Image (cartoon, rainbow, N blue to C red):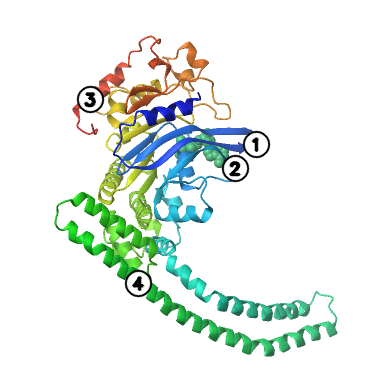
Amino acid sequence: MRFQDQYQNIIEENNTNEGKEKVLEVKDLTISFKTDNGKVQAVRGVSFDLYKGETLCIVGESGSGKSVTSKAIMGILSANALVEGGQIIYQGEDLLKVSENEFHRIRGHKIGMIFQDPLSSLNPIMKIGKQITEVMIINGNHLKHKYDDLISDELIKFKNDERLLQIAKDEWKHAKKKKNNVSAEEKAKTEANYSKEKVRLSPIIAADKAALNEAKKKAKVEVGALRKEIVARHKQLRAPILERLFTFKNVKKDYADFISERRRYVSEIRVTHKEAKMRALRIMQEVGIPEPERRFNQYPFEFSGGMRQRIVIAIALTADPDILICDEPTTALDVTIQAQILELINKLKAARHMSVIFITHDLGVVANMADRVAVMYAGKIVEYGTASDVFYSPAHPYTWALLSSIPDIDSKERLEAIPGTPPNMLFPPKGDAFALRSRYALGIDFKEEPPMFVVSPTHYAASWLLDSRAPEAVLPKIVTTRIANSLKKAGVKQ
Ligand SMILES: Nc1ncnc2c1ncn2[C@@H]1O[C@H](COP(=O)(O)OP(=O)(O)O)[C@@H](O)[C@H]1O
Ligand SMILES: [Mg+2]
């Protein structure tokens, strides 16, 4: 049986997470890139589940395939990417199979993403407020589509007739140019033609324009009525939920219903500019941007790095996503600001019942964030477990190495850099890819790929050290010290 199948079976057989709702399932995801030097095997059979309301942290050194995995979920892989296999199941659909259109709908509304460098995701020459509202208006475009449909015949006729006149005009202009060897007779002819077309087309174009305006007026009325219907329906559906909610008998469920009805409604309605602005100001406040009214009209360069990242988060939130993917969102920020952004993400996750995929190269960052941790190395998940599994009983030598490399201010211990460099994914190593850099490597590590061993029902690791025949490996002292230290501090969720 293949490694990935085994892993998949293990997850399915040992499902102690029963009762928890899965919002996303990544199964055996395999992605390469075609390059001039050959095929880069960036992601090699990655599987994980994301549960509702949980934060999954994906941790690994640079180049391990974290961003490629998240880009695949977002459907924004670069053109030379090759999805060689796997599934990304979201709400019963495989995101790798849905049509482009469908993907946009899902991405726009349900899965939001923020990146390492907030500047690269903001438009430097557009005011912040517009950047936030623009997304809302583009996303909430169901009624806009309806409106566009209703006026499309008139619009096309108008544009076509206008173009006919433009063609005649261009011909004449071209003939008039000095350098052209066009005879005087020919020039006169194009000019006459243009005049004739102008006379013929002007009234037609005027009529087209009138018809278009008429169509716009009618469409506005029709869309307005539809809008009213949608709002009325929302109010009607919301009323009993609110009633239940204010009995305070089952607040958790009733609030979840309230939120899901609001999501449904938001996805149906086109946001007006005024509404968009009101919402933008509210969200700016929610993400901790002081004086949102004033800030609304400023440009990205007028904001600090931390504030810019808050704006990027605000933009992601406008769509009310139920999954938020954060790809190294704090790497470019200094430490105090980093802590604030992490706190903000935690706060938003709780308040909005979101699930979060948090990607980082720094295991130290995830201690206060993660419910679950997936450790990635060379395109694979080598250890997967709850935060306490991974922090208190790490099982893979690579995880030990990551834990040893976290700078620890409390213990005076020097941080230990991981020796060597990550492998070149044009030629992934055989067996355990980390063996070359590991002082715990066994002979078999260089020959055969370790299967996913079950450490506990929630905890798996792919290391031959977990095989019953393996010699006992003693955790590095620095790791045991750190575990003891972090147990003292109360930060990690148990
Ligand atoms: N467009 C691309 N073309 C070729 N190789 C790529 C491309 N994007 C990523 N890679 C390679 O895929 C591997 C994983 O990259 P990535 O997911 O960005 O790593 P990280 O874990 O640092 O986010 C790396 O070896 C990287 O060089
Ligand atoms: Mg990355």
User: How much space separates mark 2 and mark 1, taking CA atoms?
Assistant: 11 Å
Q: Can you tell which mark lies on residue 80?
A: 2
Secondary structure under tag 1 reads loop
Residue of label 3: 485
Label 3: element kind: helix
Quarter of the image that includes the C terminus: top left
For residue 57, above or below residue 238:
above
Question: Looking at the image, is mark 1 or mark 3 earlier in the sequence?
Answer: 1
Which mark is in front, 1 or 4? 4
**432 or 307, nearer to the observer:** 432
| Residue for badge 1 | 36
Q: Which numbered disc covers residue 229?
A: 4
For the residues marked 1 and 4, what is the alpha-carbon distance in whole angstroms?
Answer: 56 Å
Q: Residues within 10 Å of mark 1 (few under 14, many from 20)?
A: few
Q: Earlier in the sequence, mark 2 or mark 4?
A: 2
Of badges 2 and 1, nearer the viewer stands 2
Q: CA distance from mark 2 to mark 4?
A: 46 Å
Is residue 487 something one can see in this rendering?
yes
- Residue at the image position 80 percent from the left and 74 percent from the top: 179
The foreground one among 411 and 397 is 397
N-terminal of the pair, mark 2 or mark 3, is: 2
Disc nearest the viewer among 3 and 4: 4
Q: In terms of depth relative to the viewer, which is nearer, 439 or 161?
A: 161
